[in-house]
Image (spheres, rainbow, N blue to C red):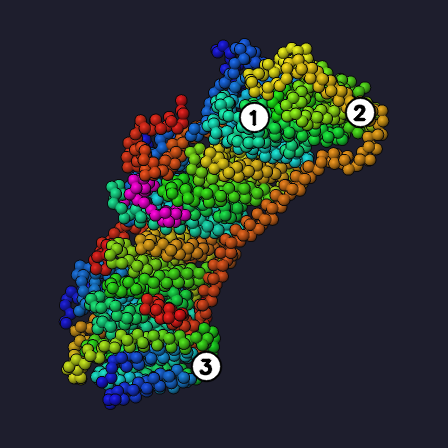
Amino acid sequence: MPTQPMLEYLWIIPLLPLVGSAINGLFGAKWSNAIVNSVALGSTGLSFLCALEAVREFFAQGQVLVRREYFDWIIAGNFRAGFDLQMDQLTVVMVLVVTGVGFLIHIYSTGYMAHEGGYYRFFSYLNLFMFFMLILVLAANYVLLFVGWEGVGLASYLLIGFYFLRKSASDAGKKAFIVNRIGDFGFMLGMFLLFRTFGTLDFTTLFAKAGQWPAEAMGVYGTLTIASLLLFMGACGKSAQLPLYVWLPDAMEGPTPVSALIHAATMVTAGVYVVARSNILFVHAPTAMFVVAVVGCATAFFAATIGLVQTDIKKVLAYSTVSQLGYMFLACGVGAFSAGIFHLMTHAFFKALLFLAAGSVIHAMGGEQDMRKMGGLWKTIPWTFATMLIATLAIAGIPLFAGFFSKDAILFAAFQNSGGSHILYIFGLLTALLTSFYMFRLIFLTFSGKQRFDEHKVHIHESPWSMLGPLVILALLSIFGGWFALPTFFQGPDYFSNFLAPIFAGRELAETTSEVLVHQLELILAGVAVASALLGWAVAYWLYVKRPGKPERLAKSMAGVYNTLLNKYYVDELYAAVIVRPLVWLSTNVLWKTVDAGVIDGTVNGIAQGTGVVGDQVRQTQSGNTRSYAVWVLVGAILVIAVIFWPILKPVAGMAQR
Amino acid sequence: MVPTQYYVILSAILFGLGVFAFIFKRNIISIFMSIELMLNAVNLAFVAFSQAKGQLDGQIFVLFVIVVAAAEAAVGLGIIILIARNRQSLNVERVDLLKL
Amino acid sequence: MSLSLILFFLLATLAVIGAVSLILQRHPIHSALSLIVVMVALAGLYLLLGAEFVAAVQIIVYGGAIMVLFVFVIMLLNAAAEERTDISKIANSGLILPLVAVLTAFLGVTIARGTEFMQAAARAPGQGLVLADTRALSHMLFTDFVYPFELTSFLILVAILGAVVLAQRENQ
Amino acid sequence: MTPGLLSVLIFFPACGVLALLPLRSDDHTWIRRLALTISLIEFGFSLWLLRNARIGWSGYQFQEFATWIHYPPINYHLGVDGISLFLVLLTTLLTPISILASWSSISHRVKEFFIMLLLLEVGVVGVFLSLDLFLFFLFWEVMLIPMAFLIGIWGHERRVYAAVKFVLYTMAGSILMLVGIIWLYNSTGTFDLAGFHYGKFDVAGVQELLQAGVLSLSPRTEMLLFLSFFLAFAIKVPLFPLHTWLPDAHVEAPTAGSVMLAGVLLKMGTYGMLRFCLPLFPEAAHRAAPWVAALAIVGIIYGALVAMVQPNLKKLVAYSSVSHLGFVVLGIFAFNNISIQGAVYQMLAHGISTGALFLLVGMLYDRRHTFEMSEFGGLAMPMPKLAAFFLFVALSSLGLPILNGFVGEYLILLGTYQVHWTWAAWAATGVILSACYLLWAYQRVFFGEITHDKNRTLPDISSRERGILIAMAVITLWMGIGSAYIIRRTAGSSQAVLDQMTRPQMHEAATPKLRTPQDATPRTAQRTQLAAERLGTR
Amino acid sequence: MIPRPEDFYRVLPETVWCLFGVLAMVLQPMVRSRHVLSALAFAGALLGTLATFLSAAHSGPAFNGLIQFDGYSLFFHWLIGIIACMSVLVAAPYLDREGLEPAEFYALLLFATAGMGVLASAQELLTGFIGLEMSSISSYILAGYRRDSLKSSESAMKYFLLGSFATAFFLYGIALVYGATGTTNLALMSATDSSSTLLRLGLSLILIGLGFKVAAAPFQIWTPDVYEGAPTPVTALFSAGPKAAAFALLLRIFATVHAASDFWFWAFWLLAILTMFAGNLGALVQTNVKRLLAYSSIAHAGYILVAFAAVTFMRSEIDGAGPAYAAILFYLASYALVKIGAFAIVSELGGKGEKNLSLDDYAGLSQRQPVIAATLTLFLLSLLGLPITAGFFGKLYIFKAAVNSHLIWLAVLMAVNSVIGAYYYLRLIVVMYMREPSPEALQLAPVRFSVGVNVVLVIAILGTLYLGLFPNSILQMILQRSLIGGGRFQ
């Protein structure tokens, strides 16, 4: 027995959910919900415990990187992709978030999904997701990471399309997978380039070698810049950044716990994780960093504007997720990787909570998701209301809630490192304002005011404790989850970034001004951020509580803007018109019907038919008339003589020509 | 004396006329006769060469050719009778059941 | 111009006229008669060439037996004048005459050029002994060429067989 | 070593045919059982072969040699190396699978059907095991007829058209290859070289001549020879734009025929490229590579796009083969160690996953007698198990990691990228497109509401079908995770292909060649060293 | 020069065939039994074939050099003898079915065989001419042997008229050769001046005459009609025998008059291409099986002509023409076997009055008569040139000959033709295996094949497979013993 059993057998952590998934998937169909529950929860819970134990051992052995090679997965030539897992500080954060939040959502799901068909299937998929997500975060090389990367995509596909009878659901699943694949295309090329450059895809060796690599100047598209951008393309796909974000709002077709787990807390943050994991590459490629920051910031703002007018409760949250992911990328882009990861973690808490609470609302409303048909729910489902409010406060960045700390850190970094123009910061701040507005809009529309539904038809009821329990835990996390950073406001150490320091060691962009100034600046910026959050809250209050008729009038007076926002800037339509439909048209009419059936097969068949026609012509010479035959013999005779006498005839023929 | 050349040129002309006759004539018997004409042309060439070479071989060949021609005539006319009996026509162009 | 040359041209003209007549005559019997003219003319040429035996055979076997057979069959079948059908497009295309002419011309020219120097060789002394020729001929036939000669007997057998088979009436 | 094992492998099914002949032709049960038994025993033989094959040995093993025909020298020369080993295994695996798949769907002229299937196996195994060029050609042609019969007799509506198209297409290429073989033989025939005087005309012999510089072809000749071989193989693969026989053949063929066609026959083309085109005509191969790669890439994208819009499910799978085999060709013609190993792997993976796809499509056909996707829809409801297997196989086909399709595709792209990054970049779009067409098709067939009442009561898979599918699924998964097991065995041979492409005059430092066919005794030390270097085996 | 005893040994096969021909005629009034006559004819054909052993024991020139019995003659005598034997066996049930007189038929068949034998061993053009006429005139009669059939008589007429037309060219060629060299003996001729245009012209006319006999395009024009109209067993004979014999003489002329080889090449090249295409393209759209096979035999003549082109392309300094010559012989043997086998089946399936000859009549044959269908398939595959059949090696050797002479493009064209050819052979196979028979056809009782035909089929099958598996046995024999001049080209 090794001294650190869990670190030695890291593979147990991901394997447990896989086993659960396999058992439920293969045999669960005939089992009752209780057995399915115990398998699913058991495997995830055990996995969580194992993760905790591993983390404990990790701390116990002094926070040194642990790397284990289990077996050769792919070997070819000098290429080796092993089934290698590793654990370091970054992994610790991710593993805990994944298993912890995942476990909570599993519990929640037992309540939420209790009356759905395909119960075993759902948990099988969910466990499968856990497996792949854990592989993703534990992987010690890019190829294995890619396994998790693709695998979570698969699980996402399966879960979005869980209600496969609905065309919209299966469409959304397909869309998610394909858009992700577009990102993966870049990710793969990035890996190839890295392998070509460094000859390995193992994190440790690769990063060590990349550390020696000279940093590329801004505006230079060197190897690392290209590689980083390609990796970032993958991240864009997975983390729903511009221009590949389109799948995420559609992904809300899946059951709500799925939205919470995959499309809010864990999977979509994988892109951030990869960027953070590859930070050394990005740091050496300022151009790539700049792109990451700009894309993140743009996405954050862009998604937030769409979120302003959405009426579907989950859609609002979806766009909010896109927006928050943008924040994380903004953080990474400006070099504040630890801030990004910090936000990733807090976001996992409050966004999971928001989704779960929204699920609880939907559950209570009997499946209704349109906020315009809700209202005044705070009395009937108080627990849900309370937890959701906490989450909203957190996301809006109200001080002392988790989101406040992480968001503040990001805005601060953006202010400091945006090259003087502060554009990134200003948009970040605007986004914070918008976030606050639409989140409170959601709260007000849902919980306050009059009930806009028929009470006789909809039987409002608070959710069971299996659902409320996780809500409460997550609410606590949403409050306290950010307190790692509390000391910084009193010029204390930033525990979170210190913990992650070995990963990002020395690579976070250098601070420019003196500590005191920085501290003052930080306080000022925090104040501005809080002010904007409060402003957003106030506007929401004014519009949706004080003057309930105002928003409609506003929408009418600015119909163009409103419709554009409501229809998400028509991006889906644009993609359909510019990419999807032309491609299908091209494939159908040009490639298949014209080139394949027409040109190529036409040529083949044409040759065959042409041969047949020539054959028929040859046959026509066989007229049956002996006189004609005699002519042919004569012609043949002349031909033979002509050919044999050609050497002699040639000069004669030449003369005739001249 | 007459040069051998003259004979062979004559033989070539007769041969050519035979070829033309073969294609031109429609009556099977006439066509057959044009073959005989061609054979005669050949014979002339043989005799002429025989004389030119001072050998008798050529004349022997002529005898053989005549015998073969006789045999062919017997068979050919038999076939012609068969055709005439089967089809009531001696026009070679009307005998075109087998074609394509 | 020597007598033999005059004779040659006369006979040659006759032969060509006969051949052309064979082509132009519409009735087979006339064609047959034209062919006989050709054969007789050729017999004359054989004589001119000093091949008396061949000339005799030409008259007796060819002109006599074979052509009689032709005439007999023409009569037997009561063959009428030739029907000038134009079913074969290619044979009536007007291309035939030039083609045949080209072929003939080429044959004639090539043969003529190939035989230019033959006369000297041809005029070896001792030629013209007709009787010795015939004897030598028969001698050769029964020694050097005895095998083909015997084969021709089977050939004639085949011909007889053919005539029997082909001209036989159905089941007697 | 087990003497004569390769001969047994080739001719055992033929003996099986003889055993089938005396059975009454209406005794379907026993015909099926006997055929299955024969094919399973054959599979056992190939497993035995796998067990005895030496790992890391790049040359030919189990060689058998017997003089057969002196002029031109056609010798019965067999041998197996890492590449052919697994292709043989694939063949012998897919044959019993095909037999099982035809268990109840073939009820017409049953005996002939199984005879044809076994004869096909003879031909295909022969192709993979022949070292002699003429012998190779012989089996190559022999294989044609049973396949044509399988399509032509037991196929669907346009079966005859498809069968004839298949034969003519293939023959057009192969007969030119025959001319090429003869030409090559003639080129070698004028040289006096020990070893060649025995009248051997096998791959290794010719290679040796080339390596020794005794035989040198002019660039033009080499290119023409290369093309004559390549065309035959490209048609078989099929490489764009020579692929149009494939959709027809696949759509019309019975399930077993499609499985064998996609699973094994297409691989004969890529196998041929690896075995003949590259080692025999390295210069020409190098010169042609950009063009070939361009065609392969066009094939990848084009095949995927056309597959995407097919209304016919089987045709879709057929076009997907065009796309997938494009990867293989690309991998081969990137001349990179990694990409070639990927290509070899992809050949095997494609055999399994596309074979399984055809099995599944066949099962759908058995139930609904149509391939039109518009006739399906919502099938996941009445038959969840079939839907699950289909998804699994589709995922492996679109290259999901830890399933078999990923390994080959990844290695090919990775290897290709090392030498020509643009090729890899273009080819990688195929990865996106494969997801598009497979998932779209899957959605149309299995998801959504049931639109046709007939579909409401379709039975889920039977236990026989389940058995087949589980076997395929297990192999798929195993190949996705345990690829090292296979690659360890193929690596030496794949590397050998590349080694053979370098001539001594180009690389003076060439060590004594490991692959000396005449030399039966292994040079153990070198072998292990090489293996260790290459594989990092611990 | 008086004939010597050994001279008679050297023409023994022909003598035996002729004598049995006469015997068949003579015995006809006495013997009424068809079986006895068939047996007699078969015995004659077989004895003649066996007599070649005696001839081979005394090989050499005969009759003043008119005849040369050597390994080459031996090969062709064997081939022709076997063809004759098989033809007799195929013809016996046919004559019975059609109610035709057997005696004359067999006599003519044996005379024709004798004529071919003469062709095969003729060393002198006039003797060759007599042999040619013996086989041709017999063939004309045989083609018209079904007197009451319009097709048969038409076939005889066309064959006769066009055959005589071509013979006239051939004869004129002999005359010119004689004029140029003063001899018609090939051996003597080879010693004379070869540059003369007269000789060249004479030889080209001979090529025209023989080209007609071997059905080289554009002289192939008579072939389909004649083959279709002639009684099927006769067609079987035609497609194999006279063709082989004419090729024998052609090859002997060009091999012996060695100087001639230089300028032949392009003629053979052109003829080969035209013939291949004419045969294969013409066959594509045929629906009559007999006619289809006729076209196919044209195509095969084209392939053989490819080998001729290869032979003539070989300059004398390049040794290795031997294999090319051998390829021709091998091809003829493999082709003849298969063709007769195929026609035997067509003959039997044709039924009384040859009424079942269309492709439709073959629909679903595999279900009505599986063994016959399989046999015919084997023959078709051999004609197609698929491995382990004789046809494959025939084709392989020709390819090799062509490639050896650096005639790559000719080989490629031949390959293209093989593919075109594959189409119509496959079409027949497809019809037999993949088309359902019409209801009426299913009602028909399976055709029962006579013992003789079965023997023919077995011989053809075994021969096809034997040559397909062990071609070397025959090829070595040809290379060592059957080449003109004792393999001096080797």
How far apart marks 1 and 2 lie (CA) works out to 39 Å
| Residue A553: x %, y % from top left | 84, 33
Q: Which mark is residue A282?
A: 1
Q: Quadrant of the N terminus of chain D?
A: top left
Badge 3 amino acid: Glu
Q: Is residue D253 above or below residue A406?
A: below
Q: Residue at x 14, y 66 (%)?
A: E5
Q: Is residue A159 left or right of residue E291?
A: right
How far apart marks 1 and 3 lie (CA) works out to 100 Å
- Dot 1: chain letter: A
Q: Quadrant of the C terminus of chain D?
A: top left
How far apart marks 2 and 3 lie (CA) works out to 113 Å
Label 2 sits on a secondary structure element that is: helix
Magenta-colored stretch includes residue A323: no
Q: Main secondary structure of the magenta part?
A: helix
| Residue matched to label 3 | C83
| Tag in front: 1 or 3 | 1
Q: A546 or D269, which lies in front?
A: A546
Q: D456 or E128, which lies in front?
A: E128
Q: Residue at x 85, y 30 (%)?
A: A549
Q: Which residues are magenta?
A: D199-227
Badge 2 amino acid: Val
Label 1 sits on a secondary structure element that is: helix
Q: Residue at x 60, y 17 (%)?
A: A93
- Dot 3: chain letter: C
| Tag in front: 1 or 2 | 1
